[in-house]
Amino acid sequence: MLKFCNSYPSTVWVTIMWYHPNCSDGGNWEKAGWWQIVPGACKVAFGDDLDDVNRYWCFYAQAADGAVWSGPYMRSVPHQAFDWCEWTSQSGARSVGYRLLDINGYDDYTLTLVP
């Protein structure tokens, strides 16, 4: 299970990307989002054993006040809830930079977003 907790003083929204070989658009990763997490709360973004999928996961988070947790892996995402293959896009989508997350072989992982 991949869980995100919000220790930031503003509401955050999270999207994740995980290894999914031969996704329908020809990519090898799937991306989904947005989980809205109010300060002090947690949300499960992926409910199965993480290590059964891959050691590496990616995430991007943004806060209502403009703060972001990002990385170098640019992918297109819509503004509303979604579940797409890595190269899927649509008119009006935007690019965000996913950050690599090494779960180190754990089946469950909790990431706490902090200031």
Image (tube, grey):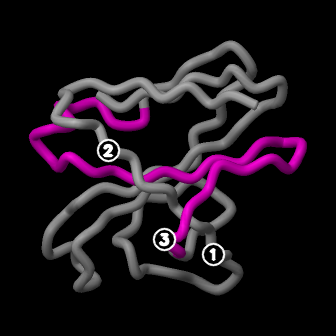
The residue pinned by badge 2 equals 102
**Mark 1: which amino acid?**
Ser
Q: Nearer the viewer, residue 19 or 114?
A: 114
For mark 2, give the secondary structure. strand
- Label at residue 95: 1
- Residue in the picture at 64% in, 58% down: 80
- Badges 1 and 2: C-beta atoms under 8 Å apart? no
The residue pinned by badge 3 equals 73
**Considering the image in quadrants, where does the C terminus appear?**
top right
- Badges 3 and 1: C-beta atoms under 8 Å apart? no
**Mark 2: which amino acid?**
Asp
Left or right? Give the position of 66 relative to 104. Answer: right
In the depicted structure, whether residue 34 falls above or below residue 96: above
The stretch drawn in magenta includes residue 37: no
**Marks 3 and 2, how far apart at CA:** 14 Å
**Mark 3: which amino acid?**
Tyr
The stretch drawn in magenta includes residue 56: yes
Task: Provide the residue span drawn in magenta.
Answer: 45-74
**Marks 1 and 2, how far apart at CA:** 22 Å
Residue 11 in which image quadrant = top right
- Where is residue 108 drawn, in percent x and y? 26, 24
Q: Residue furthest left?
A: 52
